[in-house]
Amino acid sequence: MNKILVAVTGMLCASALVVSAQDTSKSKKSKLTAEQQAVQKEMLAKYDTNKDGKIDKTEQAAMSKEDKEKMTKAGLSKTGKKSAAKTTTGSTTGSTTNAPAH
């Protein structure tokens, strides 16, 4: 009887954690600040050549370095995260290949 109660209690706790995790993932999509909205509007007006409301890879390639930095500072750039990950991966790979073999 006690084993059944412990099992049921464990399942209820696990279910509560899953539901809680799902609720927080939905709320993580925060609204853009006024500054972010202004930067986004400016970049879309300047670089969105196909007028789809998004800046795709070809449009992003045409962006100036200053505008890319402006987007990164406003927290709108996804490329900053990717390039940081590539840099980290590259440096990790480099350090393991240079390690002496025993």
Image (cartoon, rainbow, N blue to C red):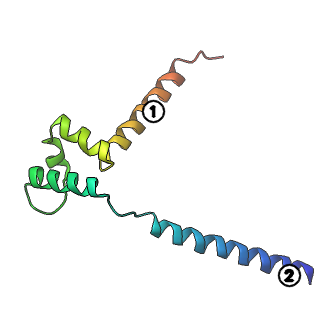
| 9 and 98: which is toward the camera | 9
Left or right? Give the position of 15 relative to 24. Answer: right
Label 1, residues with CA under 10 Å away: few <14, some 14-19, many ≥20: few
- According to the image, label 1 marks what residue? 88
Amino acid type of the residue that numbered disc 2 sits on in the rendered structure:
Ile
| 67 and 51: which is toward the camera | 67
Quadrant location of residue 40? bottom left
Quadrant holding the N terminus:
bottom right
- According to the image, label 2 marks what residue? 4
Q: Residue at x 12, y 42 (%)?
A: 62
What count of labels does the image hold? 2
Q: Position of residue 27 (x, y in %)?
A: 46, 68
SS under mark 2? helix
Label 2, residues with CA under 10 Å away: few <14, some 14-19, many ≥20: few
Of the two numbered discs 2 and 1 on the same chain, state the one appearing first in sequence. 2
Quadrant holding the C terminus:
top right
Amino acid type of the residue that numbered disc 1 sits on in the rendered structure:
Thr
SS under mark 1? helix
Left or right? Give the position of 41 relative to 88. Answer: left
> Which numbered dot is residue 11?
none
